[in-house]
């Protein structure tokens, strides 16, 4: 399904949906007066044979919200459902989540925009508005809580235009009673130490989005030397910095449910199944600083963020007063993770 440039129509059904969502939001606010359970969510892939979605369904009672792999951009700056995923798959995820009182956000990345990338619409006010309208159209058509924006290919000089785009999208979504969440590159200083982080203005973005998910992972990633994926000391630096610029009630701490295998011929990301299949994985040690699993391999090493290394970050999120945590990605994690997160969500 492709979503057009969007002069969004105020049809009767849309107005009813808007009223229903407003009532639900008001009820949710009233509920928060009496309860403050810790909030957990995760990104869900829909093109992995059903594993990610199945893990969500198995542990839905832990979830406050879920971000489904829904949308991709087109070369002309519009939006469509991810190709190769059946329409029934989207409907099933939305229906299941609604039944279990879990908010659904449609994840959109900036892939598919062609050689021009985000410059196609960031540099042109008209195209920027049309792109924002297309995202609003998508959220309205799918009757979901809102959009989860994950654009990461910007240049440092895109900072002002990207902030303007986020402001524009937030205003258009809020007008239709939809929410905007955003994935933000991790940084512990301003303006950041690489182009992606420098393109993200925490202050301007934090004022208009409803939830800001800081990607506190890939401290070391496959393109660089081996090391912790997300040392808690580094995570603390990043989140303390974010707290000086973004309201804490909007902040969610990113949790990695994966690892990396830095072994020749090249490094690669690994899920729990792949890590567990490595020779000697059952006897893997731990890095003293990060407490992540550390396994020497032929010519390299594999690191993995399991339930033991990640559980202190739940306590960190609580102590900092954050809205909650968000995991990348459902289905890749250590199965014991759920023994840790479930009681935390009941706090």
Image (spheres, rainbow, N blue to C red):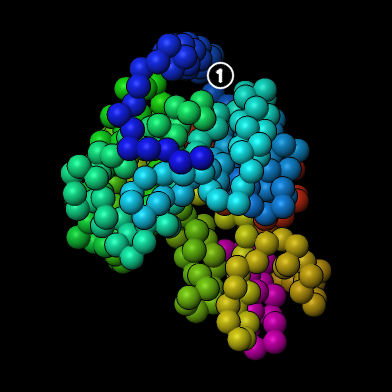
Q: For residue 301: magenta? A: yes
Q: Position of residue 185 (x, y in %)?
A: 38, 55
Q: How many marks?
A: 1
Q: Position of residue 221 (x, y in %)?
A: 50, 70
Quadrant location, the C terminus: top right
- Can the viewer see residue 138? yes
In front of the other: 109 or 185:
109
Q: Residue furthest bottom?
A: 299
Q: Determine the image quadrant of residue 173.
A: top left
x 75%, y 38%: residue: 58
Q: Secondary structure at mark 1?
A: loop
Left or right of residue 316: residue 299? right
Residue designated by label 1: 35
x 59%, y 73%: residue: 268
Question: Please, is residue 214 above or below residue 192 in the view?
Answer: above
x 56%, y 41%: residue: 68
Q: Position of residue 342 (x, y in %)?
A: 69, 36
Q: Residues within 10 Å of mark 1 (few under 14, many from 20)?
A: few
Q: For residue 297: magenta? A: yes
In front of the other: 123 or 274:
123
In front of the other: 280 or 116:
116
x 70%, y 87%: residue: 298
Which residues lie in the magenta part? 288-304
Left or right of residue 57: residue 218? left
Q: Position of residue 96 (x, y in %)?
A: 68, 29
Left or right of residue 188: residue 145? right
In front of the other: 134 or 284:
134
- Can the viewer see residue 345? no
Question: Please, is residue 223 above or below residue 344 in the view?
Answer: below
């Amino acid at each position: 399904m492709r979503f057009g440039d969007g002069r969004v129509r105020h049809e009767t059904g849309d107005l009813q949906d808007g009223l229903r969502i407003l009532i639900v939001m008001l009820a949710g606010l009233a509920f928060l007066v009496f309860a403050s359970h810790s909030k957990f969510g995760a990104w869900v892939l829909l093109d992995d044979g059903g594993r990610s979605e199945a893990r969500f369904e198995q542990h839905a009672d832990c979830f406050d919200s879920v971000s489904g792999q829904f949308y991709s951009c087109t070369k002309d700056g519009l939006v469509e459902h991810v190709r190769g995923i059946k329409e029934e798959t989207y409907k099933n995820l939305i229906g299941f989540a609604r039944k279990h009182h879990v908010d659904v956000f449609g994840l959109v990345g900036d892939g598919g925009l062609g050689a021009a990338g985000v410059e196609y619409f960031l540099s042109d006010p008209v195209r920027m508005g049309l792109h924002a309208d297309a995202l609003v159209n998508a959220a309205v058509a799918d009757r979901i809580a809102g959009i989860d924006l994950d654009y990461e290919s910007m240049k440092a000089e895109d900072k002002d235009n990207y902030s303007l785009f986020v402001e524009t999208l937030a205003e258009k979504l809020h007008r239709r009673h939809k929410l905007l969440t955003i994935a933000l590159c991790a940084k512990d200083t301003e303006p950041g130490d690489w182009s992606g982080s420098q393109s993200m203005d925490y202050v301007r973005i934090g004022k208009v989005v409803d939830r800001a998910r800081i990607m506190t992972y890939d401290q070391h990633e496959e393109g660089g030397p081996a090391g912790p994926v997300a040392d808690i000391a580094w995570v603390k630096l990043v989140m303390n910095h974010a707290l000086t610029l973004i309201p804490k009630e909007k902040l969610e701490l990113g949790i990695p449910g994966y690892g990396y295998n830095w072994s020749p011929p090249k490094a690669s990301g690994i899920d729990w199944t792949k890590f567990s299949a490595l020779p000697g994985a059952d006897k893997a040690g731990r890095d003293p600083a990060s407490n992540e699993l550390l396994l020497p391999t032929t010519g390299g090493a594999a690191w993995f963020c399991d339930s033991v290394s990640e559980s202190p970050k739940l306590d960190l999120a609580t102590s900092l007063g954050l809205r909650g945590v968000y995991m990348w990605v459902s289905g890749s994690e250590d199965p014991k993770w759920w023994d840790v997160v479930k009681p935390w969500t009941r706090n």
